Image (cartoon, grey):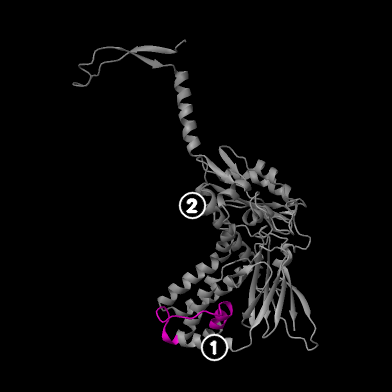
């Protein structure tokens, strides 16, 4: 085998004491070509160690999805593309919990701020924060299976109401707690005597009114039923002893499809809720751009923190005939600048044109460049990304799906789905996006009445 090398003489040091006793000798030095090869290999190893991945989980577009094309467009120099199937494996069935975290994030943050302000005796500011927290957490109940944080916010609001000399505010908050959790009692360790006394009084008052019931009907015998964020059982069933008032009903099938309704239970009456498990329902989009921006940031923060330290691609329709794309980096909790363009009647095609241009926002190491960080987040419809919602809620391939949801139909858009611009502009039709409450009044004729709410159908039987 031929060796490439040159021979040189080692010079003797001019510094006394250094190299004086070292005899002259010949030393082999590698050919510059081999040196460059070694440096290239070392650089390649270092580059491989710095390699960043891009998580791609669909687009927030009502129609025209093309997952394969999106994955191809996201392949950038030195970065690895991770698709929805790999992300789903990393989640390990925690999709529903992640949705809870995302939907409740803003309300939890406002609750924490309110409690700190309360502790520092800034009561007016605390009042505003807690009221905003309750509103945000009520909105989240459309897609959340856990109502404990809302109860905590209501209890804090009631406690503050008493501290500020506003007993009517306290009573309203405590009444809402009893509606959500009729068996709840306050202890004297965590709550002042005045708070416990008023809560007990409100509880007796609410329970003195005749209870109502909800009959949940579903074709999936294994579907889980939650009312006000509390697990009630599996399959079709009647939930009795519900206090009269508004209640959130969420039914989740083994297929991952979900159905939601906000209904008002009448004293002594039975509500029948038919839950069609045909959609991967995450929650209703916010009415305002600011609300949709908050929902997008919360959803991708929750997702990114669970599945990667690299980058997450965010893309979708931002309004009428406009699309946008940007990156989110969980490691730094930073969003990139947004690239926008007109859809020109082809939203997906426009997104595919924009995605490769995001490479300009990458650092040499592959992560997000500090110069590309931006405070704004895309205002998207959180429920319009079919691939993402199926990934979060759908079963693994080897699992059996619901009897009314054949595997071939999973992820397909429902013909009854409402486009997000309609929800976003509903304004007077829905209160704060997810409070789609159905206010039903008894009929003097004694006949059944039927009306749609949320994603299911509610019938009041007299």
Dot 1, crowdedness within 10 Å: few (<14), some or many (≥20)? few
Front residue (pair 436, 328): 436
Horizontal side of residue 377 vs 12, given as left or right = right
Seen in the picture, residue 163 relative to 260 is either above or below; the reply is below
**Which residue is label 1 attached to?**
204
Asked which secondary structure carries label 1, the reply is helix
Instruction: List x then y, in percent, for residue 38.
Output: 45, 24
Magenta-colored span: 173-194
Instruction: List x then y, in percent, for residue 349.
Output: 73, 47
Regarding residue 127, the answer to whether it shows in the image is no
Seen in the picture, residue 64 relative to 39 is either above or below; the reply is below
The residue located at (56%, 37%) in the rendering is: 78
The residue located at (67%, 60%) in the rendering is: 383
Q: CA distance from mark 2 to mark 1?
A: 50 Å
Instruction: List x then y, in percent, for residue 454.
Output: 70, 70
Seen in the picture, residue 216 relative to 374 is either above or below; the reply is below
Asked which secondary structure carries label 2, the reply is loop
Q: Is residue 176 magenta?
A: yes
């Amino acid at each position: 085998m031929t060796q490439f090398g040159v021979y040189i003489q080692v010079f003797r040091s001019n510094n006394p004491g250094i190299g004086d006793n070292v005899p002259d000798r010949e030393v082999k030095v590698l050919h510059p070509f081999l040196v460059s090869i070694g440096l290239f290999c070392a650089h390649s190893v270092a580059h491989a160690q710095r390699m960043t991945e891009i998580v791609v989980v669909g687009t927030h577009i009502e129609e025209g999805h093309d997952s394969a094309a999106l994955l191809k467009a996201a392949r950038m120099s030195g970065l690895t593309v991770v698709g929805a199937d790999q992300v789903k494996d990393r989640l390990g069935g925690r999709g529903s919990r992640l949705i809870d975290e995302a939907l409740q994030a803003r309300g939890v943050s406002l609750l924490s701020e309110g409690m700190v302000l309360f502790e520092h005796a800034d009561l007016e500011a605390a009042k505003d924060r807690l009221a905003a927290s309750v509103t945000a957490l009520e909105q989240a109940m459309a897609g959340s299976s856990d109502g404990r944080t809302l109860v905590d916010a209501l209890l804090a609001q009631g406690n503050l109401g008493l501290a500020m000399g506003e007993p009517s505010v306290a009573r309203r908050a405590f009444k809402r707690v009893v509606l959500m959790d009729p068996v709840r009692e306050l202890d004297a360790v965590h709550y002042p005597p005045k708070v416990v006394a008023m809560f007990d009084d409100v509880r007796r008052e609410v329970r003195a009114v005749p209870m109502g019931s909800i009959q949940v009907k579903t074709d999936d015998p294994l579907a889980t039923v939650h009312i006000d964020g509390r697990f009630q059982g599996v399959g079709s069933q009647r939930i009795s002893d519900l206090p009269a008032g508004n209640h959130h009903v969420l039914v989740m099938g083994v297929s991952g499809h979900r159905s939601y309704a906000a209904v008002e239970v009448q004293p002594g009456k039975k509500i029948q809720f038919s839950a069609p498990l045909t959609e991967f329902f995450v929650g209703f989009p916010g009415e305002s751009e600011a609300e949709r921006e908050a929902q997008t940031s919360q959803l991708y923060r929750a997702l990114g923190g669970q599945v990667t330290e690299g980058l997450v691609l965010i893309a979708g329709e931002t309004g009428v005939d406009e699309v946008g794309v940007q990156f989110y980096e969980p490691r730094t909790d930073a969003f990139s600048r947004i690239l926008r363009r007109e859809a020109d009647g082809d939203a997906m095609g426009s997104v595919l044109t924009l995605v490769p241009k995001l490479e300009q926002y990458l650092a040499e190491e592959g992560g997000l460049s500090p110069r590309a960080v931006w405070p704004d987040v895309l205002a998207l419809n959180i429920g319009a990304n079919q691939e993402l919602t199926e990934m979060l809620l759908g079963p693994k391939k080897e699992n059996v799906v619901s009897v009314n949801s054949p595997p071939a139909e999973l992820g397909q858009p429902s013909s009854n789905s409402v486009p997000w611009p309609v929800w976003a502009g509903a304004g007077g039709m829905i209160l704060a996006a997810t409070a789609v409450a159905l206010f039903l009044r008894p009929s003097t004729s004694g006949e059944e009445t039927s009306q749609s709410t949320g994603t299911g159908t509610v019938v009041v039987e007299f």
